[in-house]
Amino acid sequence: MAIKRRRRANTKFYLFIGAIAVVAVVVLFFIFNLQTVEVERGAIPFEAEVSVVVVRDEQVISAQNYGKANYIAAEGERVEAEAPVMEVYKWGYNEKVMNDLIDYQTKIEQYQENGFESEELTNLQNQITAKAVELRNIINGAAEGDVVTAERELKALMAQKQQYLKDNVSADQQLQEFYTQEEEIQGRVNNWRQQLTAPSAGVVSYYFDGAEDTLNAANIENIKSADIVDILNGTTSVQTSQDEEAEKPVYRLVNSFKWYLVVQSETEIPEFTNDREFSVAFDDYVARQYQGVVSGTVKEENDYLYVIEISDDIGELLNVRRTEARVFTQFEGLKVPEKALKEKDGVTGVYVVVGRDKTFVPVTVDIIKDGNAIITPVEGESLLAERQHVEV
């Protein structure tokens, strides 16, 4: 009778079974022991130092090339529609004729004042003398003030005095002859003179940098990275014509409550998303800070352009084209660790864990900084909320 021997299992078999058991335990661990964190409401500060180009909502007013100009509105003055801004005199204007007009007006005034006295006349003359001293001090740097404004006020007082004398001094034959001669010369001057008025309300400026047509709010959608680089490098200059018949810019009329900053960057600034609001402080203009909203983003071949719209009074930046700025804000919302952000089918989101189940919720990432992120659910807001758990 043959004796059957019991065969002992090979050691390799036990190792194989053990490996399968380990894998099973690991799989079960990850299935039933997901690592999660609790979503919290938090804030992450953001700040960027950027070079900016200022783009204004402005009209450039032109006139036929001229030989002389009188400025009625001062630099930076706010005017209403149809308000006189400046007077220009055509080429061929004769300075001698203007001097003749002044001489006759002086003769008339001296003749009228001869033997005529009144308290009101004395008061007007005292005001004229004081204003003339003020103007001279401003010109010489001995007093603060605007030359154009002081000059305009002086002319207004002199015109008031002339009218007062004309209304109160009876005109004899000599004075009437003076009036006739003054009127004839005034007519010749008027033929050369053109008064320019404001087409709408706005702030007046007489400064140009040559980029007013390209860098204009009306053209904001067509601005290219090369235009911004030219400004930042200081390569744009004013072009003037020597053609007597040509028109040339004479002043700008600026809507001071609507203007833009354009930021050019070689790398993406993901925080600059459309409709995002930022505070803006300028390095060289520290009197105030502004609030702006990102209103446009353009991706070119190698560059990014970001447009920030500002609706505060432009103030000191009326004539500034390029400057340095600090753009900052605080992103607030749902805060999660950066490693909680996952990709699924090319979409960024988080896995919300409820019990043993997890659900992918697409999100918008507002900012990532120092290992954390502020996110906003694109959909599934009822699933993703504060104190909910997400997979990490």
Image: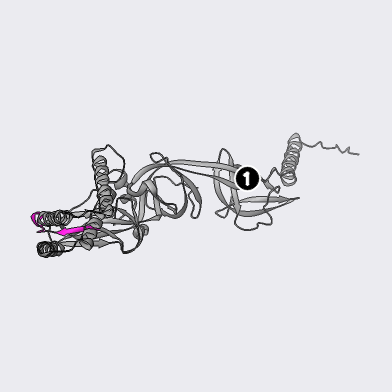
Q: Which residue is mark 1?
A: 335
Q: Indicate left or right for 29 with 133 as reference.
A: right
Look at label 1 and name its amino acid. Answer: Lys
Front in this rendered view, residue 98 or 291: 98
Colour convention: one colour
Residue 122 visible within the image: yes
Residue 82, x across and y down, in percent: 31, 64
Task: Identify the image quadrant of residue 33.
Answer: top right
Q: Secondary structure at mark 1?
A: strand
Q: Position of residue 323 (x, y in %)?
A: 36, 43
Query: Which residue is depicted at the point 72% across and 47% down?
Result: 31
Q: Position of residue 251 (x, y in %)?
A: 26, 55
Residue 130's quadrant in the figure?
top left
Looking at the picture, how far across and down is residue 198, in whole percent?
30, 61
- Front-most of residues 112 and 336: 112
Counting every numbered tag in the picture gives 1
Tell me the quarter of the image containing the N terminus. Answer: top right
Quadrant in which the C terminus appears: top right
Few, some or many residues within 10 Å of mark 1 (<14, 14–19, 20+): many
Q: Is residue 19 magenta?
A: no
Which stretch is magenta? 86-97
Q: Which residue extends farthest right?
A: 1
In the image, 257 versus 169, the foreground residue is 169
Q: Quick check: is 93 in the magenta stretch?
A: yes
Q: Residue at x 10, y 65 (%)?
A: 173
Asked if residue 210 shows in the view, the reply is no
Residue toward you, 48 or 75: 75
- Kindly give the residue lying farthest to the top in the view shown: 11
Horizontal side of residue 66 vs 357, given as left or right = left
